Image (spheres, coloured by chain):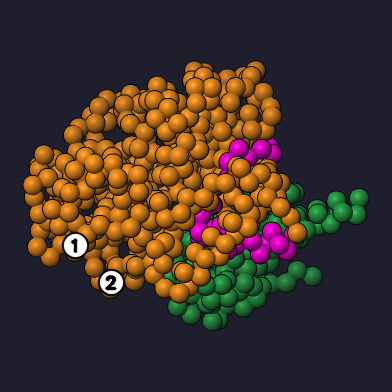
Chain colours: A green, B orange
Amino acid sequence: MTTSSRVWKFGTDVDTDVLAPGAYMKNGIEVIAQHCLEALRPDFAKTVQAGDVLVSGHNFGIGSSREQAAGALVHLGVRAVIAPSFSGLFFRNAFNLGLLLLTCPEAEQINEGELIQLVPAGVQRANGTLLPCQPIPDFLMDMVHAGGLMNVLKQRSQGTRHA
Amino acid sequence: MNHTFSGTPQTLAQKLIARAAGRTQVAVGEVVTCQVDLAMFHDSSGPRRLKPMLEELGADIWAPSKVVLVLDHYVPAQDNDAQRIIQITRDTAREWRLPHVIDSEGICHVVLPERGHLRPGMLCVGGDSHSPTGGAFGSYMFGIGATEMLGVMVTGEIWVQVPRTLRMLWKGKLSTGVCAKDMMLQMIARFGMNGGQYQAVEFAGEAVMALNMQERMTLSNMSAEMGAQAGLIAADDTTCEYLRSVGVGEEALQEAHQWHTDASATCEDASFDATQLSPQVAAPHSPANTRPVGAYGDVPIDVAYIGACTGAKLEDLRAAAQVLRGHHVAQGVRLLVAPASARDQAQAEREGVMQVLREAGAQVLPNSCGACAGYGATFEEGVTVLSSTARNFKGRMGPASVQVYLASPWTVAASALRGRISDVREQL
């Protein structure tokens, strides 16, 4: 059975500085995560629950290369981010940390607080509509399933050792 | 960096990726594995993140000679946390026996080429989003996060999806007081913050090729703000002359001119006229919020900031000095200058540029990322800043109430004199 995920809706151009504010970059991910998105929604980190998803407008993750922007979402248990487009650099970072990103041209139809399901073809809305998402290459899905590049590298080095 | 190509006409991006992938050609859209020629990281993205992960893997760095470490984000230390990060970085550099460590001598994207580390034909990665700066030297350089950098450290490889090329063709000649920063803000205004769609952007045309290397670096640098993966400029005599001046040998330059887009290669082209370009200013809180300076009316400023890899290189300091010579900033305006590298600052001292800036009332700050990264000292509640840096996101350079406008060093200097956003051309 596919589980439902609750939607947190954001606008366009959500940048890395609001995901991982510079003032907290000296700290570990547990501190950075507590300030994730607070410039847009001060209650986000306190109330988001494991398994929730973010839905956003174009250009999610623009800005810096700091992967803590994706890491903070992973730390808070966010299951996926769904948007019509992502920053290319954020896209790489997210998959490297095991965070699923779904490129969904019609993402902006989804409502705040809606319960959606992630199905192989895309996003199943509460009203039954299916919003298609761009397919993700196998090697990136493997990274999501492994929980990030670090785990892929670990598996690879163990594989070599036992070979 | 010689390489043989065959088959269909290729873009510069395709040629650079093909060489790194050991192929004679690559097709747009395919995913290939590239050998990395150089990996750069700094005190924020580097050892403090990489060391624990490397230890967890029990792995070694694939080629320490291909790694450049730059301390620029947390130096000089503002507090104990910063001091701790700097200490970890220095200790780790010794432990890893890194041969190339540049400590508190300037910002990574500026010191990398000034030490001759970048050459046409290379494929490089950087642990910083402004890594496309390296594209000004005809190398394919892009930014990656710390975990992906770990992958490079362990394997020496990285995957690349061969991008389409968006070519910015600039004809004509820039007016005095109008520069690369204005060109870039204009392009971002037209294409938006993610208009590059992770493509390769290539800058070409007479107005681009007329720029010196540091001005070209400003274009490539802010490709990041267009959402491009790389911001490339084909190598020419200007490139080779610069590389010779920083000690790159003739051998490395012999094949420099082969790194260009073939005449019939497929690009998406956009045309611009440099002759028509006026100084540009981006309003809070996005570089894409750009309008010509004349559209601003009366915007008073509290701080004029000339800093960062984008806007405080030697050429930027020279531009500011040309405007400020013999004048003093308006009452109530703070002019802050953080030269992008120690070498650039030393040269500016020799030329009398630093003296002009000081006499105009500038407070000179260390050669580091400073307020631009938002990591160290940032601006106070409610101030309005006109900055020569690359980003004006809400909350980046201080509290969310800080209003940051972006412009060229020319415009920042001219506005510091009048205490409000001003057209530099009226003062030249």
Of B307 and B226, nearer the camera is: B307
Which residue is nearer to you in this view: B17 or B8? B17
Tell me which residue sits at (50%, 36%) in the image.
Answer: B118
**Comes first in the chain, label 2 or label 1:** 1
Which residue is identified by label 2?
Answer: B380
What range is drawn magenta here?
A: B32-57
Q: Circle 1 is placed at which residue position?
A: B334
Callouts 2 and 1 on one subunit: yes
How many neighbours does mark 2 have within 10 angstroms: few (below 14), some (14-19), or many (20 or more)?
A: few
**Residue B22 located within the stretch drawn in magenta:** no
Residue plotted at (57% across, 46% down): B99
| The quadrant where residue B177 appears | top left
Residue ID at (42%, 33%)? B246
Figure quadrant of the C terminus of chain B: top left
Q: How far apart are marks 2 and 1 (CA)?
A: 13 Å
Residue at left 23%, top 64%? Answer: B384
| Residue A7 in view of the camera | no
What chain does mark 2 sit on? B
Image vertical order of residue A110 relative to residue B409, above or below: below
